[in-house]
Every structure is written in structure tokens, then in C-alpha cells.
Amino acid sequence: MKTRKFLSLIIVFLLSSLATADDQEPPFLWGSLDWSSDGRYLAVVTTGGVHIHNSDDLSLYKVLNEFVSSSIKWSNDGLRLAVGTDDPGRLIIWDLETEDETFLMTLPVVQHRRNFITSIQWSPRDTSLAAASYSGVYIWHFRTPGHVSGITFDGLLSIGFPRIHWRPGGFDIMSGSISNGIAIWNYYTGSLIDFIWNASFNSPARWSPDGNMIAAGRGPVTVWQVKPDVPHDAWAEIGGERIHRLDYGFGSLQGLSWHPDSTKLAFVFLHGDSGYPPEQDFSRDGALIWDISANTTRLIPGVFIADVSHTDKVIEWSPDGSRLASISIDGRVVIWETSNYEIVAEYAGYRSLLDP
């Protein structure tokens, strides 16, 4: 019953979004947010393009393209924003200083259906860009200014919504969900380095900022210790060592974001009885902070996300860990100060999915 109600909600959302351009109503938030590396900007995906906000007060700084975007990612130097558009399935790079757009590709059609980019990642030094889609993982190497070369790894196809994450400071790409697991690949050769079993389908997966752990799942969430620079055939056990597990209450966890010091994880919790319009009750939902070193949790009420799986970027720590940002399906973007988890900025200028 809940699934049926959720599908109805999505249909209403899609129909409403088609009318947005005509009646000039504010767009909906459509998952995915990302901080620039200096913490000055917060980009969010909407049905009216990518909106970039100033992070100090969440005032609107810039609106990019008119297409619905499926994923975004700031470069590590904070000067470029990679955007995967849903229509017509293009990948572009927007330059913050010049405001120029560089077109990289249009995705091929897969099995007579639309193909779109579900995850984007820059390499640690911004010399390469990886994008996951239904047709594989594409990697571009920016060798010299004005020259871009691409390579496609069809072996990185996955089930559900493909997701990738580059190992901080390393040469490995993590890809999932693949056969109920997470594959770790060398991005130069495309060879498999390791495989971690994870039964949670369509779950987000992220490397820790120190590059030594992987977290994955939507409830329960599991953290594995990963041995760096050791090929899988030399390990006593393939898949690393499970060191933490969180099974939080009756519901699901949306999104997954590591604190920069690799000690905490942030999610948005959706209680199992929250429901969908018109009988929604989000009073028990909110931003959930899991301190994995102390194995404690803290729920901060005030934001709520419908049970979606097309994005894992609904909540994100700032690069220095001092702030935490989240979107909410009632049309808000919220930023907390993480020393006391009080709201320091809020933007309520988007349309709510809860409106009749």
C-alpha cells in the first residue's frame, strides 16, 4: 500500500514539474546536494536545474541549465561542478570562475529506455572524472588543457541505481550495488581489487575520508575496515573486516555522509510509520548522527525525506565538519552548526512535495 501511495506521489510530482516552466512556480528539490571544497557554496538538484546557494545564509547565487539533473559533484579544488542531466542524458562541467560549460557526452540508450548518470566522482587530484550509469562507468582523463580522453568499463554495470565513489588519496573506485555487493576496481586497468558482500539492495556506499573504511546500507548500516594497497588474493578473507553495524529502529536511513574526521556518519531517518500524503507524520524523522567510535546516535528533528533510492546525497557534512546540510521534501534546505546542532541557515523557497 505504501509503495502504491509513493508511486502516486512521484506521478503527481512529475506532472507538476512539467507545469513549472509555464506558471513560474518554484521548482521541487530532487535529491543530491554537494558542498564546494572551500565551504562557500552549496549546490542542490531541483526540477528547474542545479541551484547554487551561498552557504552562509543560503541565498541563491546561481541557477544552472533548465534540465532536471540526476547527480552533481564539485571538483576537489572547488572550481568546477560536474552535472549529469536527465534530459537528454548529458554530462557537463561548469566552471565557477568563467561560468563556461564544457560538454563531455550524451549517454547511449540502454535496452530501449532512457539512460542517465546516477553518480559522479572526481579523482583525488581532479585529473580524472568518473560517472556511473546503466550502461557502465565512464572515465575521462584531463591530460592537457582542452584535451579530454574517455574510457568505458562495461564490467562496472550494476543492478538498481549504480553508484561510485573514489577512494580518497588512492586509485580505487568503489561501485555498487553489484550482485548484492560492492566491487572495488583499479581505475587505470579496470581490474577487480576486492568485493564486499552487502545484502542491502540499492544502498549507498562511501569511503571514509581517511580511505581506510567503507560504509554501506540503508538500515542496517555496516562499516568495514579495508586494508590499503593489499590485493584481494593476498588477504586471509576477501572483503575486509566488519567493525561496526547500526540497525536503527523501525524505518530506513536515507543518504550517507562521513564526517571529515572519519568518526561519524550522518543520515536522514524515515520512521516506518511516517506514511505518505495525505496521512504523513514525520514527527519521529530527522537528521541522524551516528558516532561510530562511541557507538551512540543522536536524532535531530526538522527534516524528512520520502523513501527514495535514486540518490544518496540528501545530507552532507561541510568540508571542515563544522556544519551539516540537508534537504527536506517540504521544500527546505537546512544547515546546522555541528557543535550544538542548532539551525544556522534555512531556505524555504522550493515547492513542497506535501502540498495537495
Image (cartoon, rainbow, N blue to C red):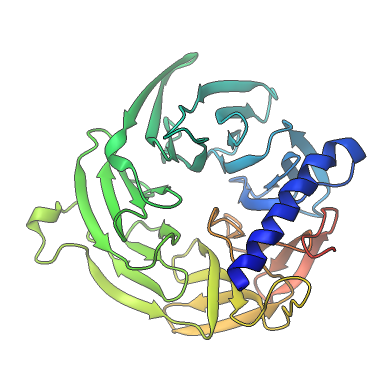
Residue at (44% x, 66% y) in the render: 262
Q: Nearer the viewer, residue 95 or 347?
A: 347
Dividing the picture into quadrants, the one containing residue 207 is bottom left
Q: Locate the N terminus by quadrant.
A: bottom right
Viewer can see residue 188: yes
Percent position of residue 254, x then y: 56, 66
Q: Is residue 184 above or below residue 343?
A: above
Name above or below for residue 142 compared with residue 171: above
Asked whether residue 55 appears in the rendered view, the answer is: no
Q: Which quarter of the picture shows residue 353? A: bottom right
**Percent position (x, y) of residue 69?**
63, 40
Residue at image location 14% in from the left, 51% down from the top:
231
Position of residue 303 in the picture relative to residue 82 (left or right): right
Is 257 situated left or right of 326 in this image? left
User: Looking at the figure, which quarter contains the C terminus?
Assistant: bottom right
Count of numbered labels shown in the rendering: 0
Q: Nearer the viewer, residue 15 or 49?
A: 15
- State the image coordinates of residue 340 (x, y, percent, origin top left): 69, 77
Q: In the image, what residue occupies the spot 82% across and 53% down?
A: 350
Closer to the camera in the image, 119 or 279: 279
As drawn, the residue found furthest toward the right would be 23
Q: Is residue 143 left or right of residue 265?
A: left
As drawn, 199 above or below 25: below
